[in-house]
Amino acid sequence: MPDLAMLDYFYGDEAEQFTFYRIPKVLFTDPSYRRISSDAKILYGLMLDRMGLSVRNGWLDEYNRVFIFFTLEDALEYLCCGHTKAVSLFGELDKAGLIERKKQGQGKPTKIYVKNFVRNAEVLTSEKRKSKVPQSGSQDFQKTASNNTEIKDTELSDTEPSIYPARGLPEDRSPAADAMDTMRVYRQIIMENIEYDITRRQLGYDADILDEIVDIMVDTVCSTKPMIRIGGQDFPLEVVKSRLLKLNSEHISYVVSSLKSNTTKVRNIRAYLLTALYNAPTTISSYYTALVNHDLYGGG
């Protein structure tokens, strides 16, 4: 925590240079949202911020609706709360209709649709009010607006978009911050796909290699290179990414087993593992078939 005695004041427009999480004002002023806890409202703001990442990654369903991935672990880390509290906060937002969760089955991350906090009727009313304002504006109107230096808070609707361009929106975040968020989300997706905790327990003494495998998968999926080299051959990133995101716990166990049974010296373990992971879906069946035949008919 920074030394409070060393913190300085804001001067001029310095406060506008930072990136902020945004919590809609209407969540605090609309009576229908009053019963939602402050922590749940903060969680909603965090999810709104994650929406920008989803848009940039093209995470849309067949109806063009944006969805996000935001786990309980995310809430635990961001809000510094316990598991029970995090579950309760998700429940609050769900009950209020601010989010909608869609489970995708075992081993698949839950999709979360962040719902619009403005009701359809309010949006239509806001649009009607804006349509009454002349596009060009008269000189009298411009003069009145420029002379009115004190704008009362009650004169602005809590549900209307700001008339001033917003700064510090998710799109304006630094590339480094955006990359970190992307890697965090994909790490969660991959760990859920491969049932990380269960797989780690099953691997026993070989569990340490699992973290290296996850790191390789995350680095590759989040790569900015258009082509990825696999086994001496270049493949389009999207092809490699698609295949890695389809791997499950069986594929990971197979890759670890293949590594253990390999008798030749591996000079580049990272390249070896990436190749094994990429080829796992097409070679796993023949590998286990060969093992069964070996057990049935002997090794020679």
Image (cartoon, rainbow, N blue to C red):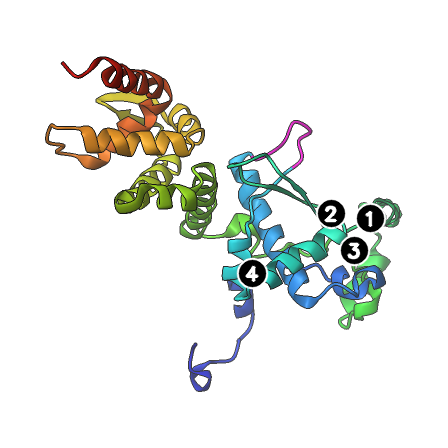
Look at the image and give the residue range highlighted in magenta.
Answer: 59-65
User: Which secondary structure is most common in the magenta stretch?
Assistant: loop
Against 35, residue 125 (above or below) is above
Instruction: Give the image quarter of residue 276.
Output: top left
- In reply to whether residue 62 is colored magenta, the answer given is yes
Query: Mark 1 and mark 3: span between their CA atoms?
Result: 9 Å
- Could you tell which of marks 2 and 3 lies nearer the N-terminus? 2
Label 3 sits on a secondary structure element that is: loop
- Tell me whether the residue at label 2 lies in contact with that at label 3, contact meaning CB atoms closer than 8 angstroms: no
Who is closer to the viewer here, 78 or 28? 78
Is 29 within the magenta? no
- Specify the label residue 116 is tagged with: 2
Q: Amino acid at mark 3?
A: Thr
| Circles 2 and 1: CB atoms closer than 8 Å | yes
Q: Residues within 10 Å of mark 3 (few under 14, many from 20)?
A: some
The residue sitting at 52% across, 55% down in the picture is: 74
Q: Amino acid at mark 4?
A: His
Badge 4 element: helix
x, y (%) of residue 148?
A: 79, 69
